[in-house]
Image (spheres, rainbow, N blue to C red):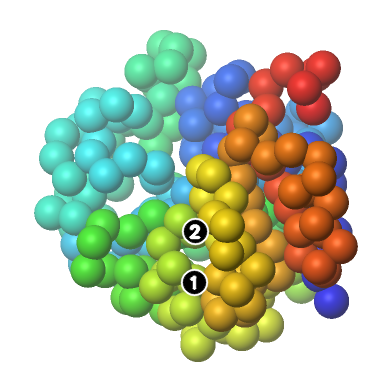
Amino acid sequence: MKIKTPFVIGHRGAAGQAPENTAAAFKKAAQLCARWVEFDVRLTRDGQPIVFHDETLERTTDGHGRILDLDWEDIQEVDAGQWYDRKYLAERILTLQEAIAILQSLGLGANVEIKSTPGREVKSGHTIAADLKKHWPKDLPSPLISSFQRDCILAVKEEAPDIERALIVGDVPTDWKDVLMQLTCEGIHCRHDRVNEPLAKKIIEHGFSLRCYIVNENKRA
């Protein structure tokens, strides 16, 4: 049975209102009455799942270097909020387990997007799915895992087959039905400006969920 997600899911928490993928962004999303948030998870060099979008620290922290080359100990004290506004000086990168605890305190569901550097897709999928399986609270709706990387999705299927999965794409591929069936995904996530009504109807009529990103205008939504 497919998860029923709300019409609006906060992107990276509430990325337009607070530093993305931080506790502050999750709290802001809840204040704005979001019931679900989307956030990114990737592995550090030593295999710690952290809530972080980019491959490198520079854009959203005061740290430097590639996540792939750094252990959790190397980055756990970097500042992850000041780049957005000085009032977020105390924000730091979260582990996935820490993020889950915050979501539970706020009553937020989640779409967890797996990010991976090439060659670590299988490890990323297994590790992140195992963490979700172990720590996800029963009083929250079941999480949704999504990824652009197909090997991540297949690894999630092996590790936690009961967690719903979705493939992320830019353009919907012409063979979307075969791809989704091969990956045993329940849904597909695509750019909002790369899908039309007939295609959307066809995807839904075939029993798949369709979610579009990133819609920032009320009229478009």
Crowd class of label 2 (few under 14; some 14 to 19; many from 20; radius 10 Å): many
Q: Are marks 2 and 1 in contact (CB under 8 Å)?
A: yes
**Which residue is at the front of the view, 54 or 109?**
54
Q: Position of residue 124 (x, y in %)?
A: 36, 69
- The residue type indicated by label 2 comes to Ser
**Which residue is at the front of the view, 40 or 105?**
40
Left or right, residue 52 beside residue 167: left
Q: Position of residue 204 (x, y in %)?
A: 82, 59
- The residue to which callout 1 is attached is 153
On-image quarter of the N terminus: bottom right
Q: Is residue 110 above or below residue 7?
A: below
**Which residue is at the front of the view, 153 or 83?**
153
Q: Position of residue 83 (x, y in %)?
A: 36, 18
The residues tagged by marks 2 and 1 sit, at their Cα atoms, a distance apart of 7 Å
Residue 162: assigned label: none
- The residue to which callout 2 is attached is 147
Name the residue located 48 percent from the left edge and 49 percent from the top edge.
40
* Upstream in sequence: badge 2 or badge 1: 2
Q: Is residue 168 above or below residue 30?
A: below
Residue 178 seen in this snapshot: yes
SS assignment at label 2: strand
Residue 135 lies in quadrant: bottom right
**Which residue is at the front of the view, 72 or 191?**
191
Crowd class of label 1 (few under 14; some 14 to 19; many from 20; radius 10 Å): many
Left or right, residue 47 beside residue 19: left
Q: Is residue 132 above or below residue 31?
A: below
- The residue type indicated by label 1 comes to Ile
Residue 73 seen in this snapshot: no
Q: Position of residue 148 (x, y in %)?
A: 46, 56
